Amino acid sequence: QVQLVESGGGLVQAGGSLRLSCAASGGISSIITMGWFRQAPGRAREMVASISSGGTTDYAESVKGRFTISRDNAKNTMYLQMNSLKPDDTAVYYCGGRLPFASNYGYWGQGTQVTVSS
């Protein structure tokens, strides 16, 4: 079983930066694809960025050039560096984990609130 715990959310002004962290535990965290998702009020959860165990990354178009996803397998931790934040980035951000060859993310953190003021 994999446990995921996010940290690093908060309130920031537009144009500012935040770094989110996701600590994974459970013994297999180094072999799963991990991702950041977000959900704003009244909107569906959307994928923000993902990173494979080998470091291959993928980003939503809305965050390309502003957000950077990374992971430290030795520390079983994933990060999301968010720069040039916009009010539209306001959401609860969730860390997710997906086993190799699985079609869906089966592991989720509790979420951390990111609020960007204009």
Image (cartoon, rainbow, N blue to C red):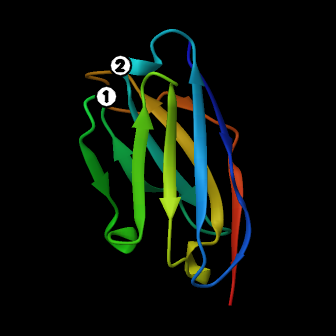
Which element carries disc 2, helix, strand or loop?
Answer: helix
Sooner in the amino-acid sequence: mark 2 or mark 1: 2
Residue 13: which numbered mark, if any? Answer: none
Q: Residue at x 64, y 65 (%)?
A: 91
Q: Which residue is mark 1?
A: 53
Residue 1, percent across and down? 56, 11
Which element carries disc 1, helix, strand or loop?
Answer: loop
Look at the image and tell me in which quarter the C terminus lies. bottom right
Residue 106, percent across and down? 48, 27
In this rendered view, identify the residue nearer to me: 33 or 14: 14
Which residue is situated farthest in the right direction here?
11
Say left or right for 33 vs 108.
left
Q: Residue at x 23, y 41 (%)?
A: 56
Q: Quadrant of residue 22?
A: top right
* CA distance separating discs 2 and 1: 5 Å
Residue 5, percent across and down? 67, 33
Say left or right for 27 vs 6.
left
Q: Quadrant of residue 55?
A: top left
Q: Residue at x 33, y 69 (%)?
A: 64
Say left or right for 8 vs 31.
right
> Mark 1 packing: few (<14 Cα in 10 Å), some, or many (20+)?
some
Q: Amino acid at mark 1?
A: Ser
> Mark 2 packing: few (<14 Cα in 10 Å), some, or many (20+)?
some
Asked if the residues shown at circle 2 and circle 1 are in contact, with their CB atoms under 8 angstroms apart, the answer is yes
Say left or right for 43 vs 102.
right
Q: Quadrant of residue 15?
A: bottom right
Residue 31: which numbered mark, if any? Answer: 2
Q: Amino acid at mark 2?
A: Ile
Which residue is situated farthest in the bottom direction here?
118
